[in-house]
Amino acid sequence: MKSPKPILPLPAAELSSAEYALQVSELRYRRLFETAQDGILILNADTGKIDDVNPFLTDMLGYSRAQLMGNRLWDIVPFKNVDASKAEFRELQRESYVRYEDVPLETRDGRAINVEFVSNIYQVNGDRVVQCNIRDITKRRQAEEKLKEYSRKLQVLSRRLVEAQETERRTIARELHDEIGQALTVMQLNLQAMLQAPGAEALSPRLRENLLVVDHVLEQVRDISFNLRPLILDDLGLEPALRWFTKRQAALVGLAVRFHADPLAHRLTPVIETECFRVAQEALTNVVRHARAKKVAVELRQSAGKLQLHVRDDGIGFDVAAVRKQSVRGASLGLLSMEERVALAGGGLEFKSVPGKGTDVHAWFPLKWKKGSAKFKKP
């Protein structure tokens, strides 16, 4: 862009102080106008004709000043959508201010660009003029599109990782339950039979000790299997699994439990069941570990066309903003994990907590029914 020629005011001796001040003010404005790094377009507010353009705009659009001057806004090629330009001009005349975040334009050499368009009307020497500030946001738009594409790819990858994780958990839980669990159960029964066999008195202390060890290991295997993925979730569905897990967790620290679930006419999709259960699992685990609560309530309801999950406790609460900052820094990933799982399932998550006044974890999910359930069977 060529540097504008310097404009010098007349000597102060030839002008009154007011005239000189006005000329200096106009000179400052002109310098700002000429050197601005946004395109500026000055229109007649009544006719829509272009009265002035700055060099940045001519460079942006590829037209000379002479090619733009005197034309109406909707007569120049970049604003060739006549109906839209006229309508926007009429809106500007009514509102005195319009703003468009993303306007597609075409330059003289055929390039498509996106601009931010801001216009307002003001008075100059008794005449109404329109100043339009036009900022090229093409690179910003391109960067935003790339970011959106990366986000979409990351979301797909996250979903596949979660699905793979759940599949692996299901497989390991089944093997623990069906293979190792059953083997330990057989060993437990054999030890009990040996204790009752004739002449086992001499071996009783060792047999009882081994039986206690087997009982303990069997309990650990069951806990690991349940924590990996409770088979009841796959076999019976979300409501029975959630009811069982709530009572199990509350029993660990002696919590009073209130559980309510609206009846679900059909099984939900595995994704919805899994992510809803995992959010409740994380929330209840946090209650047991950190809340110091006396009561916990779990609600599963159908409302506003969605599945609504609430996990409420009367514990010490926490500072949600502070915990979220810690999560971002990697100190605690529980909250971020819950948010990620809900997002992957197409739902939303909200934490309401006040230190000393308990916590309400609210998650909602789309009501998506499992294919093959009664809802999908043809009569």
Image: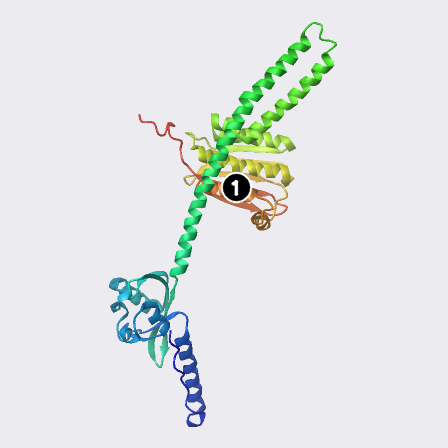
| Residue toward you, 189 or 160 | 160
Which residue is denoted by mark 1 in the rendering?
338
Determine whether 287 is above or below 16 in the image. Answer: above
Residue 310: where, in percent of width, then height?
Answer: 52, 39
Quadrant for residue 208, please give it: top right
How has the structure been colored for display?
rainbow
User: Compared to 200, does 74 lie above or below?
Assistant: below
- Left or right, 197 with reference to 61: right
x then y, percent, for residue 8: 41, 86
Report the front residue among 6 and 22. 6
Q: Is residue 13 above or below residue 311?
A: below
- Which quarter of the picture shows residue 83? bottom left
Left or right, residue 74 beside residue 276: left
Q: Quadrant of the N terminus?
A: bottom left
The residue at 62%/22% (across/down) is: 218
- SS at badge 1: helix
Corner quadrant of residue 247: top right
User: As rendered, which of 230 and 184 lies closer to the eye?
Assistant: 184
Pinpoint residue 324: horizontal percent, then vertical percent: 56, 48
Can you give x and y, in whole percent of width and height, for residue 347 in the image? 45, 42
Depth check: 218 or 268 in front? 218
Neighbours of disc 1 within 10 Å: few (<14), some (14-19), many (20+): many
Which amino acid, mark 1? Met
Residue furthest to the bottom in view is 13
Quadrant location of the C terminus in the rendered image: top left
Query: Residue 131, can we see it?
Result: no
Residue at 63% of width from left, 33% of height from top? 255
Residue sticking out furthest to the top: 198
Residue 143 in sight: yes
* Count of all numbered marks drawn on residues in the image: 1
Q: Is residue 25 above or below residue 357?
A: below
